[in-house]
Amino acid sequence: MKTGLQAGHDSAAPIVQLVDEHAADEAAQLARARAFAEPLLAGRALDTGEDALAHADGVAAVLQQIGAAPSMRAAAYLVYAGDFLNKPEEVVEKAFGPSHASLVLHTRKLVQIQRAARDAKVGEDQRALQTERVRKMLLAFSRDLRVVLLRLASRLQTLRYHAATRRACPEVLARESMQVFAPLANRLGIWQIKWELEDLSFRFLQPDDYRTVARLLDEKRVEREQRVEAFRVRLMAQLRAHGLRAEVQGRPKHLYSIWKKMQGKSLDFTRVFDIRAMRVIVDGVPDCYAVLSRVHELYRPVPGEFDDYIAKPKANGYQSLHTVVLDQDDRAVEVQIRTRAMHEHAEHGVAAHWAYKEAGTKGYAGVVAGADFDAQVAEARKAVLRQLLAWERDFAAPSTGTGEGVFDDRIYVFTPDAAVVELPAGATPIDFAYAVHTDLGHRCRGAKVDGAMVPLNTPLKSGQTVEVTAIKEGGPSLDWLNAELGYMRSTRSRAKVRAWFNALALAGTIARGREAVEKLLQREGRTAIKLDDLAAQLGFRNADALFEVVGKDEFSLRHIENLLRPAEPLPTPDEVIALKRTRAEGESPKGGVLVVGVESLLTTLARCCRPAPPDAISGYVTRGKGVAIHRRDCSNFREMAARSPERVIAVEWGVPRGDKGAMYPVDVMVEAADRQGLLRDISEVFAKEKMNVAGVKTQTVRDAQGGTAWMTFTIEVADAARLAQVLHLVGRVAGVRSARRK
């Protein structure tokens, strides 16, 4: 019978064998990839001026420094070899498998996009926006973390090349490295790449400041290094004497970090603590705090310069204890204390998480296949995603607060001049046109994608170049608003199209109002009056505002008539008597209206408000037209009464005699969703209620929902009190939104 120990050794043996075999396979794959790429890259130059093979070797070396697997380093050769193959994805897939083919495809695509973005013809005021879009494109392509790591390593190698050869580095490339790649490396916690990107970019962007800091570091360098070494030896001896196993090493000095602290805190060079720094690496977290205690016993800590990033890690997962103490000569020394695992993460960050892409069921880098393998993969992907989303939030606040959709909800395409345009996923050439310029969107009639004509409802993909064909004049089509046809995905585009049709409808309304006002002015012989002055006298900001309400039947032309006509003098007693007429015995007054205290005056029902029993009414004495009968709530009557109260006369409804009662015309306004048969259905309601329709005016305004119909019915009633019941029935007709008396 085997002991548990023996059984454990026996079960571990196949796992170790699998890991060894996998490592051997990957090493062979790396050698094969370089041999495959060498004849393609030898003697070739990249657009940066670098030798292609030397650049690929440098990228593979950078990846090795941060712990990449051989298969990952192999991809560095295949990506650059792809530039010199006819069908790179197909060739790589046959020779090295679909995983490497996918990596080659996406990395080459991203490289092409970044090159085009850097060469884009945009003004200085657009550079910041262009950099922001490059950063977002990097996010959009980073479903596969290997793409991001390859781009980081490639950019670092390019900066190293410019530094080693002392060739001037293009400012746009150095600035992009500082503003995009270094923050990304920081967010992913890959410290080795982050600080070197910053220092090299600093060297190219601000050479004078770089040389100043470098010169300050070089001064008394030997003396400073001797002091640092003495501090290191003494601290290690003290820790060992207290039974603490620790590795103590000097920490690299980063010029950009020193310069930034000098600028940000207005510090003198001698007061920057990064100049003298130690790093203590121990086995476990309890040892970290034990070492911290011992350091504070040996040296006096500087107040306010202690940070516990173990209890509260940084956003990118960085953990360490930071403290600043004074040595025997009262010189500040920064001490960082961390475990070995924390140190690996600080140097390599989440780079280790590409394991989920490289590992198969055989396992990789200590991740052994087993029941919990899927869970490990899921956690690795979540860790990467969290850091990339956090990097996104470093630059712009998330719209949803959840960070979801950063990768899936946006695409990035190019104008013919290589300017980057950000669009929602699934966006079409019409969305693209509106994103470039509203007027271009209105006039868009065709599009080319990567040089080929496509329908306007074709979904675009990241990296494509879009060219819009536009007419000289014109506007959008109503079909674009039909969601089923798929012409637009962007809410911004839809809003612009709706605004265009709303403006078109408004222009029609204003034209109708202008026509009505101008006809009135011609009738009154006042065509010389300035329309803006007329509008101002009526209380409108300009003539178009007046035309709009007139065109909507929301403002009566009677107001303009009253303004244009001089006030009529009061009728003399003789004129009032002349208005009398004779009527037969027992005859009701015409219109069923009696003027209180005066017999047989001529009366007319005002057309502006169309009164009918039992409305409360009042009379207004006009010149030559008798007494005009208005509803008391009529706005025209209130205005005239306020201007000439002496013309107001009391009236009341008379009692009709005979078999047939008087009929009174009233106006009813109906608003409804336009549809076929709407007028017929409303007319049937009036017919069933035995109400005669004397006239109808209709107007339809087209919109995204089909259109809105405005109808004015003139119906004859004997009693206005019954009108409310009929309007209720009209309101129940399908599509009717409101029905009211005018």
Image: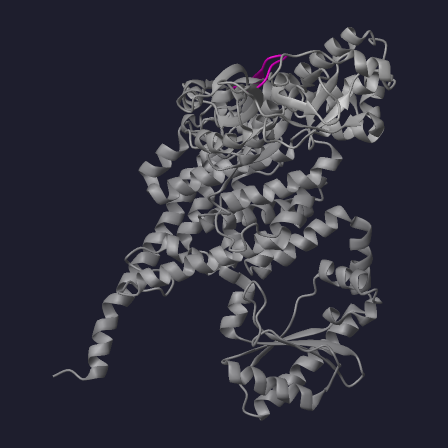
Q: Nearer the viewer, residue 425 or 114?
A: 425
Question: Is residue 314 inside the magenta stretch?
Answer: no
Q: Is the magenta stretch mostly helix, strand or loop?
A: loop
Q: Position of residue 602 (x, y in %)?
A: 71, 15
Q: Where is residue 280 in the image (x, y as percent from the top left)?
A: 60, 78
Which residue is pictured at 48% across the width and 51% down the height?
404
Q: Which of 678 and 628 is in front in this view?
A: 628
Position of 556 relative to 732 (above/below): above
Residue span colored magenta = 469-477
Task: Report the colour scheme.
Answer: one colour
Where, by quadrant of the figure, is residue 645 drawn? top right
Q: Can residue 697 be seen in this view?
A: yes
Q: Which of 490 and 182 is in front in this view?
A: 490
Q: Which of 298 and 50 is in front in this view?
A: 298
Q: Where is residue 523 in the image (x, y as percent from the top left)?
A: 76, 7
Position of 329 relative to 536 (above/below): below
Q: Can residue 418 be seen in this view?
A: no
- The single residue placed furthest to the bottom in the displayed view is 242
Q: Where is residue 293 in the image (x, y as percent from the top left)?
A: 63, 88
**Is residue 494 left or right of 683 when viewed as pictured?**
right
Which residue is pictured at 44% across the width and 22% down the height?
686
Quadrant in which the C terminus appears: top right
